[in-house]
Image (cartoon, rainbow, N blue to C red):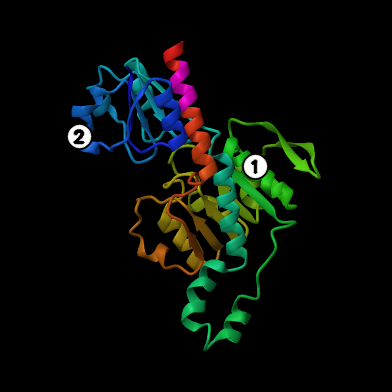
Amino acid sequence: MKRILANDGMENAALQALQQAGFELITAKVPQEELPSKINEYDVLTVRSATKVRKPLIDVITRTKLIIRGGVGLDNIDVEYAQSKGITVKNTPRASSLSVAELVFAHLFGAVRFLNDSNRQMPVNGLSQFNDLKKKYAGGIELRGKTLGLIGFGNIGQETAKIGLGIGMNISAFDPYVKNAALKISVGGNDVNIAITTVSKEVVLQSSDFISIHAAGSTEVLNAEDFSKMKQGVGIINCARGGVIKEHVLLENLNAGKVAFAGLDVYEEEPTKNAALLSHPKVSLTPHIGASTKEAQERIGKEVVDIITAFFNA
């Protein structure tokens, strides 16, 4: 019987499906420091973002032949090194795309109407300063008619674009690996294909009212020079990876007024200890929950089951 270590958990339906298929599932988490001594008890390792699969762990593997990241990114796994050792590495790139895209818009809708700050202020000052707060938060704006810039136009970027198009936004997208995309949107029960041609990064920076990052990996993609090219009062959303924006650079631009607001789901360090970021009135915060919807986890689980069964039935 093949043994699977689901070290960062697995959706219940997926667990049951794999058990019914004859696999033995272990969901008790093995601490990172104990993995080297335990890994060879398993044929398959599944992880999310918590467990790291780096060279020292890979070097001791003799039994495990399949590693699966339940999610989009693979930055917590040394993929090429694992593959060089004969280990197959897979992920589930499409399963959580819609969930992340919807979180982008949760941040956007909240930010343009100051929900993050008004929710802080109302319980404290709502009774004594209601009319003052009403005036303070009366200058919101609509998203319709504005330009949404996307840095990265893969699965998640394209799902984000679909939502933006659906509410009447203009889309400006940059991706060095994607030139054209046909986005299928349902309008009145009918599917409509909308063609998007990507543009240069500079065009996105200069033309966008809001910029959402969807680049793979954690390499910096918006630096201080990039911010200087943006519109005054731009909004920034990062539901991709911590590190694609340096937090001190973002804070500098927020405090200078160049950036009107930021919505963040990911951080350079998690959990973040950046007090200035945590308390900033122009920052909307979520604790890395982009893929954490019931539907996304069900889709991830199904893809993981399909990967494992196909691997051992090949």
Secondary structure mostly seen in the magenta stretch: helix
CA separation in Å, label 1 and label 2: 43 Å
> Which residue is more in the foreground, 2 or 95?
2
Q: Which stretch did the figure color magenta?
A: 305-310
Residue positioned 24% across, 23% down in the render: 41
The residue under the point 49% across, 63% down is: 283
Q: Secondary structure at mark 2?
A: helix
Vertical arrangement, residue 209 with respect to residue 13, above or below: below
Q: Amino acid at mark 2?
A: Glu
For the residue pair 236 and 45, the one nearer the viewer reads as 45
Which of discs 1 and 2 lies nearer the camera? The answer is 2
Tell me the tag on residue 222: none
Q: Which residue is the site of mark 1?
A: 173
- What residue occupies the far front of the structure in this picture? 20
Q: Position of residue 174 (x, y in %)?
A: 62, 40
The image quadrant that residue 50 belongs to is: top left
**Placement of 86 over or under 195, stated as above or below:** above
Q: Residues within 10 Å of mark 2 (few under 14, many from 20)?
A: few
Q: Is residue 184 left or right of residue 4?
A: right
Residue under label 2: 34
